[in-house]
Image (cartoon, grey):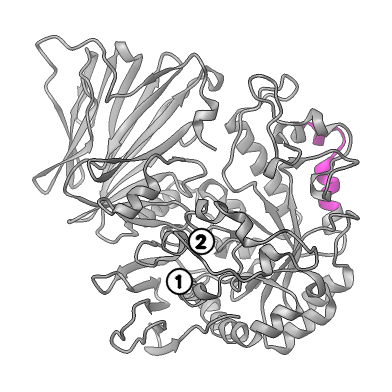
Amino acid sequence: MSLRRHVETSRIVLSFLSLIGVVTAAAAETPIEIGLRGWSAILEPETLSVRARINGQPEMLAAGGSPHVVESVTRAEESASWAIPALGITAKFTVHGNRLHARFESSRDQTFEWPRTGEDLNLLALILPEGEGLYVPLADAAWRGRLSGQCFTAYGQLSMPFWSYRREQGTFTYQVISDLRTELCTFDRNGRLVATARHEFLDRDQRPAYELEMWPGARSPIAPAIEYREGLVRAGQFVSLTEKIRANPEVAKLLGAVHMYVWGDGRTVEFVRDLQRMGIKRAWIGYDQDERAGTALVDHRYIAAAKEAGYLVGPYDTYSNAQDPVTGEDSVSRWPGDLYPAGCIKDREQKSLGGFAGRGCELSSEALERAEAESRPLTRRMDERLRDGANSYFLDVDAFGDLYDDYSPAHPMTPARDRANRMRRMRAIRDRGVVLGSEEGVGWSVPLLDFAHGALSVQNAVLWRNKKALGAWWPPERPKIFFLPVKPGGDFSPAKYDPAYRLPLYEAAFHAAVVATDRWDVPMAKFPALARVRQLLELLYGVPSIWAMDRRQLRESGAELSKLTQFFDTLHRRIGAAPMTDFEWITPDRLVQRTTFGNEAVLTANFGSAAFAEVKPGCLRVHWIASRQDVTFCPAAVR
């Protein structure tokens, strides 16, 4: 959700491009140069512009705006600070190793726009962690059209709170430390894509400081994500899959597992036996709840059979929606007591915030947190979902990154409080000893998650733009939205699955921390024309595929699924908990790509139409580093 929904009506919006303020006196401050490891930053206090001197070459990092009178300028060897009274802003820049740390404080409620980036003509492309990640040449007309005018919250719509640029000599990255109330907005300016960060200072939050760090990085296009990961490790904020497996050995069953949601006769013991007969050794199986009866469509026998087969199996759940407990259409949205409508999120006018697809309301995590202290609805929900022995649990929405203000006098809430509530309840599920997954798995949620459905996806707006073409949520035993094959049209394929513009940023940061997949509403057989390129992307990135399954789909796609899972099982058991340490384009068209996973393996994928070395078009070669052996796999079409 855009921050603009939350902007106070009385705020002052300050754009450094258009603001007309008090101009400085004739004696302007001299630019301040601060030396950092490997480069120096040149600061202009009156305009807040920042230039970099890297290897002797000047580059614009943050374009300046209208000059203003500055006061209280202080300089030290590794810092500089000043006040801009007309803006109600104090600024401080400090050396943090090779990173320039910027800190802004405001004396009033306002939206502050800084930095404005991407205007230096030496910059080649925007590196954007939208979902898995995008590589966007700044002059690319199609991508300027897709991204211009979009804003991405730093705590959710960006999967990680940074953006970066490719330069001839390397990369340059901007990381938002104070991600809440911050968004990044992209614009088409003079035929190039530029980006500006916006931060809201609100008294509602006690106006905490707005902080960023910026630095020049290595040449690899995934260097910004690796450097982000390294920062998390230094801060003690990175929890690896190895650590998660040590805490809960069941998590190890994710390594090599194919993911699927089951419907109809996919929820029978016979289906589990089918998977075993096909030689599928590891799988994650998810199921939703009976929308009519409020009970699970699988029973303890199904769960026992799946666990006996070595699989992870668990329910879909969500705590984000509330509907009338009598007439509500599904069990996940029916809550006891007066949580509906009393627990609905309220806007400033005390109107309830509508729920997903206009159904019911968005349930306040604070209302649910307060109810838990009295009647324990969350505890009871978990007890019910896990009573048949499930060893996994998928909690929708909570790790997606939508965080809300709630203006209800009964349960007021800020985004910071909302995030804390969501983290507490995800932790409560994990404490049950189950393998936990959620939607998207944005950066702040990863320490709590074992898997993240949707983290691999990008540009989901094109998916949701014409949902009618994807099919209805009917019939319940085989919903067309999951099982109706669709030929992708328009902008769908180039926006979501063109490998020349995809970048494994999320995997570079978190491959060793969480198992990621594509979204459940784009199961592998949904778009048959894209199945090969999707499988190739997933294998190159070291992540599993996700399917919608029943016995019919298994009969139709079983041969392809068996071939894929047998190859993936061997690959992922060895690299699934390893970090992605390198990514490179081998050909100028960026269609032959290579990833490296620690000291385990080097993977080369050919998305092109001509053979490259020993890799045929549409194929992947794995080079095992220790044994120096090569294995090739060519994904098959899916029916």
| Mark 1 vs 2: CB contact within 8 A | yes
Question: Spatial distance from mark 1 to mark 2, Cα to Cα?
Answer: 10 Å
The answer to whether residue 364 is above or below residue 259 is above
Residue occupying the point 63% across, 35% down: 418
Magenta residues, start to end: 370-383
Q: Of helix, strand and loop, which one carries label 1?
A: helix
Quadrant of the drawing holding the N terminus = top right
Quadrant of the drawing holding the C terminus = bottom right
Amino acid type, mark 1: Leu
Name the residue beneath numbered marker 1.
Answer: 537
**Closer-to-camera residue (594/387):** 594
> Does 376 appear in magenta?
yes
**Closer-to-camera residue (276/252):** 276
The answer to whether residue 3 is above or below residue 532 is above
Residue occupying the point 72% across, 74% down: 311
Residue 402 lies, in percent from the top left, at 58, 41
Horizontal side of 567 relative to 140 (left or right) equals right
Residue 613 lies, in percent from the top left, at 28, 87
Q: Of helix, strand and loop, which one carries label 2?
A: loop
Residue occupying the point 22% across, 12% down: 69
Q: Can residue 461 be seen? A: yes
Name the residue beneath numbered marker 2.
Answer: 456
